[in-house]
Amino acid sequence: MRNFIFGVIFTLLLLAAGALAFLLLGYMPTNADSKPPHMESRIANNALDASMDRHAPRITSPLPATDDNLIEGMKIYTMNCSGCHGTLDKKPSPQAHSFYPPPPQVILHPLDDPDWHIYYSIRTGIRYTAMPAWNTVLKEDEMWKVTLFLSHLEKLPAAVQDQWQKAYGAPAPSAPEGSSPQQEH
Ligand code: HEC
């Protein structure tokens, strides 16, 4: 029994040493211009969702989704987020594949996450990715406005859709029917 336990500990140490050597001898690639393998994305995305479920407070927006707040959210998005997540004229970001993991193209593939989840990603950022924590750059109400904008993308009121069309020369994403769930994380 004792030998068995020593065997297990020895194997674990060997694996840890192997992983460390793999990293320190430079076998881990650092280039950000490749697509994460399917299995890696799946594990990372499931771990991200599980961590958010555990850490993010289930809060509701202190601001209502009025036309004004959604239009403000649209402007905040354009100024700060569209370079990575896609512009409102529906073109994918030129940098969509320059990051590892790539930023989800949220205008082309609207998110279906609840407000608390979107807000938490924005406020705290996402570790080991290009997604910054915005709490030092945006004010509390600005983070909520952009959250509301993203969670209402497929159900924007007519006045906001008009403003979108006027400012960006493309129609706002239509109502949920036929909506495409988010494909790239
Ligand atoms: C420098 C590039 C960059 C900028 C600028 C950026 N993001 Fe991100 N964002 C990312 C990346 C990369 C991810 C994906 C992280 C991952 O795969 O887990 C991400 C993820 C997210 C998510 C999580 C999506 C999910 O699947 O849960 C949200 C929400 C988000 N960003 C919103 C925003 C908002 C709002 C802004 C502007 C205030 C913004 N981002 C600005 C790169 C960026």
Image (cartoon, rainbow, N blue to C red):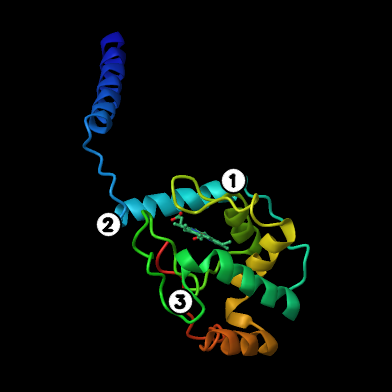
Q: What element carries label 1?
A: helix
Residue highlighted by disc 2: 34
Q: Is mark 1 within 8 Å of ligand 1?
A: no
* Residue 66 visible in the displayed image: no
Q: Which amino acid does label 3 sit on?
A: Leu
Q: Quadrant of residue 162?
A: bottom right
Please tell me whether residue 167 is drawn above or below residue 126 in the rendered image. Answer: below
Q: What element carries label 2?
A: loop
For the residues labelled 3 and 1, the Cα–Cα distance comes to 28 Å
Q: Mark 1 Cα within 10 Å, few/some/many (few <14, many 20+)? A: few
Observer-nearest of 116 and 161: 161
Residue at (25% x, 44% y) in the render: 29
Q: Which amino acid does label 2 sit on?
A: Ser
Tell me if label 2 and label 1 are in contact, CB under 8 Å: no
Q: Does the residue labelled 3 lie within 8 Å of ligand 1?
A: no
Residue 54: numbered disc:
1
Q: Is mark 3 on a helix, strand or loop?
A: loop
Q: Does the residue labelled 2 lie within 8 Å of ligand 1?
A: no
Tell me the quarter of the image containing the C terminus. bottom left
Q: Mark 2 Cα within 10 Å, few/some/many (few <14, many 20+)? A: few
